[in-house]
Each structure stands twice: as structure tokens, then as C-alpha cells.
Image (cartoon, grey):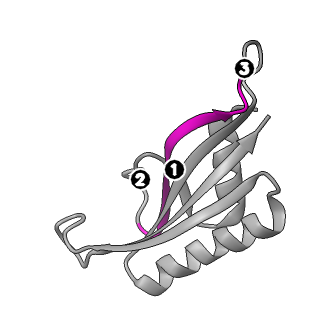
Amino acid sequence: MSVPTTIYNILDSATTTTVAPFVRPHDKDFPCVVYRFDGDSFEGSRYGDLGVRRTEVTAHCLARTLAAAETIADDIITYMDANEDCVRITRVDREYDPSYDGQRSGIYDVSVSFIYFEG
């Protein structure tokens, strides 16, 4: 299975809300999880062997209320802690964007950053 597919499956299993890479689908409303790949690195690589692949990911838990965004982030963290041996959560950040879509109240973003290990 590819890394993007694996990351999608992990996040989709962790929450019942919409999960999508890079951008929220326009036909879906909030709350949702939009994730991005921050980069891959390879530990212990040498000629003929890539070593352990480290994929850094940030999952943005987006909602109209802070409580809803926090709940989604907590669901993801709890699921990963209980079910994913190859994941290390590295940080949680919180932001608010008052003009996300220019029409309604802003969007709360509770971001869960983690590293997925493969290899």
C-alpha cells in the first residue's frame, strides 16, 4: 500500500468526519480533516538501502467551534495511540481564521502533526 493511501486510511479510521488530502472538497461542509504531507526523510540510508522512511504529516481538524475541532483532534490522537505502532505524534497547534470563507463565522483549526514510519 502506498504512503498516501495508508495515511488516508489511518485518518479515516480515526474519525467519522470527512477526510481529504490538501483541500476540503467543495461539496462538503465543516467539520472536516484536511491533511498535508510536510515531507519524507530516510534514516540510515546507504547505497542500495533507503533505510527507514519518515513521512511527516499535519492533519488539520477544521470546525466552526473550537470544541468540535478539539474533539476531532482528540479522536485522531486517541486512535493513533491505541492502534498505530508506526506513528509518533509530534505536536498539536491551534489557530483561528475569522475570514475562511467570507460568509459565516470563522474556522477553528486544531492541527495534529505526526510522523509515519515505514521500512
Task: Provide the residue designation for mark 3.
Answer: 46
Whether residue 12 appears in this view of the structure is: no
Q: How crowded is mark 1: few (under 14 residues within 10 Å), some or many (20 or more)?
A: some
Q: In this view, does 25 lie above or below 103?
A: above
Residue 46 or residue 77, whichever sits in front: 46
Q: What element carries label 3?
A: loop
Q: Residue 31: which disc?
A: none
Quarter of the figure that contains the N terminus: top right
Q: What stretch is highlighted in magenta?
A: 30-45
Q: Is residue 104 above or below residue 48?
A: below
Task: Provide the residue designation for mark 2.
Answer: 24
Q: Where is residue 87 in the image (x, y as percent from the top left)?
A: 72, 55
Which residue is found at the position 41% from the left and 64% from the top? 29
Question: What secondary structure prevails in the magenta region?
Answer: strand
Q: Is residue 34 above or below residue 64?
A: above
In this picture, residue 80 sits left or right of residue 83: left
* Alpha carbon separation for disc pair 2 and 3: 38 Å
Whether residue 33 appears in this view of the structure is: yes
**Mark 3 and mark 1 in contact (Cβ < 8 Å)?**
no
Q: What residue type is labelled 3?
A: Arg
In this picture, residue 107 sits left or right of residue 24: left
Task: Provide the residue designation for mark 1.
Answer: 20
